[in-house]
Image (spheres, rainbow, N blue to C red):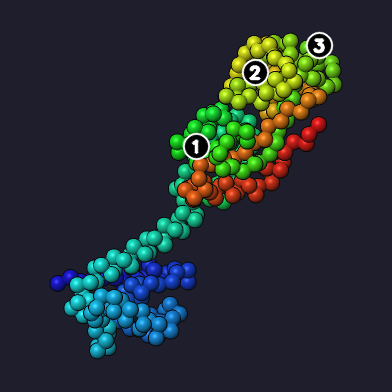
Amino acid sequence: MIIIDISFISILYRQNRSENMLSKYGILCEVIAEGSFTKVAEHFGYAQSSISASVKSVEEELSTSLIDRRRHNITWTEDGKAYAPYITAIYAAEQALTRKSKEMQGLSGQVIRIGTFTSVSRDFLPPLMQTFRNAYPGVSFELHQGDYDEIHDWLESGQIDLGFMAEVMAGKLPHDYLYEDRMLAVLPPQHPLAAREVLSLRDLEQEPFILLDEGRYSTILTAFHDEGLSPQIAYRVYDDYSILSMVRSQLGVALLFHNVIRGFDKAVAVRPLKEPVLRRTCLAYRDESTLPYAAARFRRFIRTSPSVSQHEIPRG
């Protein structure tokens, strides 16, 4: 003889009854737990006729009588006892699904994998991550730092969920435009060109040049080539802040983005350029329909954050 005790399941579910609607299987289990249609109707705010109709629906589905209505305390029939383990399992699974849904909406235990480059990971991302985690303490972040090509490949392979990159490199990937940043000339403070208020790319063409390595696409080289110029590349360096240190040590001149230089401009000479050299930064992803819930939530959070407009640099 199988004895099914669903009273504990019933109590757990009823603690959250204001937030949940019972299925017909849940109603049947509650009726057995309470032994009464009336009590279940009162507990969950249903009409008694609705409770009775739900139970009848399960019986019709299984083509048998599941509960003995003749007794003062409603119990399983013999057929009901045979079906009881399966019905209570469905009810338990429904509750587990509800809990999982709430957990997902709260982002508990979720990892957001992001591809990023130096200026974003140093300046743009940290305050966003902090604010998001204040709202959803259970979420964690996994940052993969690389150039635009690597970030694009990581997205395509599914290694990351979201990727920051120059918009020109997004290609066919769906993406959200975030902000535009402009490049400035960076020189040793003692450099003769530092005496000028504004510089042109031609002024820098013959100087030992420290090139920021952005991958296959180079914002800097594109700007020089558009002017019919070729810089004298002395070094190719991936990290923006290494370039700042090298310029300060008088190893050459460079072009760096405004958002990178901010806070470091006292150690080097920074001058605007006559020609606008701009990068449109975007947040790319592979497929909106398969984007993990936590990543999708963070993407929406970024798009509506005031930090985006604060990073938009006026031209000129």
Picture layout, residue 312 above or below residue 106:
above
Position in image of residue 262 (x %, y %) = 72, 29
Where on the picture, by quarter, is residue 184?
top right
Inspect the image, locate mark 3, and give the three-letter code of the amino acid beneath it: Pro
Q: Quadrant of the N terminus?
A: bottom left
* Residue at figure coordinates x 73%, y 16% from the top left: 229
* Residue at figure coordinates x 48%, y 68% from the top left: 19
Crowd rating for badge 2 (residues with CA inside 10 Å; few <14, some 14–19, many 20+): many
The earlier-in-sequence mark between 2 and 1 is 1
Position in image of residue 186 (x %, y %) = 73, 20
Q: Is residue 220 visible?
A: no
Mark 1, residue position: 155
> Which mark, residue 98?
none
Q: Point out the residue furthest to the left here.
A: 1
Please state which of residues 98 and 174 is positioned toward the viewer in this rendering.
Answer: 174
User: Contact (CB < 8 A) between labels 3 and 2?
Assistant: no
Q: Is residue 28 visible?
A: yes
Q: Which of labels 1 and 3 is toward the front?
A: 1
What is the tally of numbered marks visible in this picture?
Answer: 3
Q: Quadrant of the C terminus?
A: top right
Q: Secondary structure at mark 2?
A: strand
